[in-house]
Image (tube, rainbow, N blue to C red):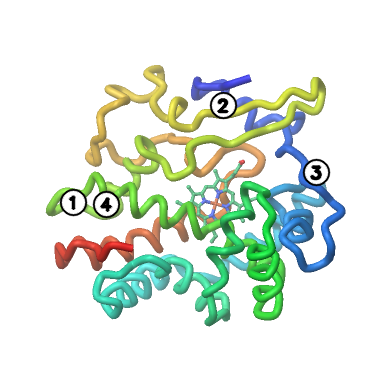
Amino acid sequence: MHITRHAEARSVLDDAAYVPPPVRQDGAKGTLAWLRAQVSRFSTGEIHAGRRRALVELLAGLEPAELRRAAAAMTEERDGDWRGVPTAVLASALGVEDTATVSAAASGYLSGEESPQADAAVARLLTLADVSVITLLLQGHAATEGLIENALRHAKPGDDPWALLEETLRQDPPLRATRRLDTRTGETVTIDLVAANRDPDVFADAKRFDPARGPSPHLTFGSGIRPCPAPGHALALAAGVLDALLATSRPPRPR
Ligand code: HEM
């Protein structure tokens, strides 16, 4: 089933009968497959609740305003070369200084695509941090960079970074869909976040990109039982990068 309406998406995300599609549980210790079996994102019920609580506690120790300042300063220091900045700032706040392997591990983390490179990256990360910290780094990496990349496509001189990011999240989200398994029927449900965020019943003139719209009930950070626990942190990291880039109107360096 493919869900495109906002109300229907919310009711699936609110309903414990819909769970993330299960991941394999038999990966060798220290591999990407093993890691995926340890994390909140792919677990359900009490196990999910316990793992999520640990992440929420860790996140409570981070100050979003400080992340924003640090992301702006690092972007400045790197002369506008912002790739890797959100992850480096988040990692440093969590006590990890070496983030070279995060992107290699992050690419398979959500998709489940296994590779020797991803396994080596996970093994390296496990020497630097525990599973909770690694979860935060891998969850946040691609989505936050994707948000900045999309926002920069829409940015105009004088835009307020926060308003630009809010509307980017709604209208041009870095995560385009999320999936659930209906435990009663075995059916896989795809929630189309782009379509739900443009539902005309909820958003006036929904297709138009309008930073003046202000915060809106978009579903890009999820909803219901297991929404993103770090929307303020993600926005702060992205806003810090944009503070530096938009203030100087410096074109971002190519990758
Ligand atoms: C623009 C950036 C981000 C977006 C759009 C985003 C979006 C999401 C969404 C939609 C989910 C829920 C997935 C689902 O219900 O299927 C999620 C989960 C999660 N996100 Fe984010 N996220 C972002 C950045 C971050 C950052 C920076 C962190 C860490 C600091 C983070 C940590 C997590 C964690 C740990 C989960 C799993 C929660 C759980 O299992 O209960 N996210 N995120």
Residue 199 coordinates in the image, percent (x, y): 41, 22
Nearest to N terminus: mark 3 or mark 2: 2
CA separation in Å, label 2 and label 4: 28 Å
* Residue at point 53%, 74% (across, down): 99
Q: Amino acid at mark 1?
A: Asp
Camera-nearest residue between 51 and 245: 245
Q: Which residue is mark 3?
A: 45
Q: Which mark is residue 78?
A: none
Is residue 114 left or right of 191 when viewed as pictured?
right
Nearest to N terminus: mark 3 or mark 1: 3
Whether the residues at callouts 3 and 1 have beta carbons within 8 Å, the answer is no
Q: Amino acid at mark 4?
A: Leu
- Of the 4 image quadrants, the one containing the N terminus is top right
Camera-nearest residue between 175 and 121: 121
Q: Secondary structure at mark 2?
A: helix
Nearest to N terminus: mark 2 or mark 1: 2
Is residue 203 left or right of 225 when viewed as pictured?
left
Is residue 210 left or right of 122 when viewed as pictured?
left
Q: Secondary structure at mark 3?
A: helix
CA separation in Å, label 1 and label 4: 11 Å
Q: Which residue is mark 2?
A: 9
CA separation in Å, label 3 and label 1: 42 Å
- Image height check: is 90 above or below 165? below
- Image height check: is 186 above or below 79? above
Q: Which residue is mark 1?
A: 159
Q: Amino acid at mark 2?
A: Ala
Is residue 2 left or right of 20 when viewed as pictured?
left
Camera-nearest residue between 101 and 233: 101
Q: Which residue is mark 4?
A: 152
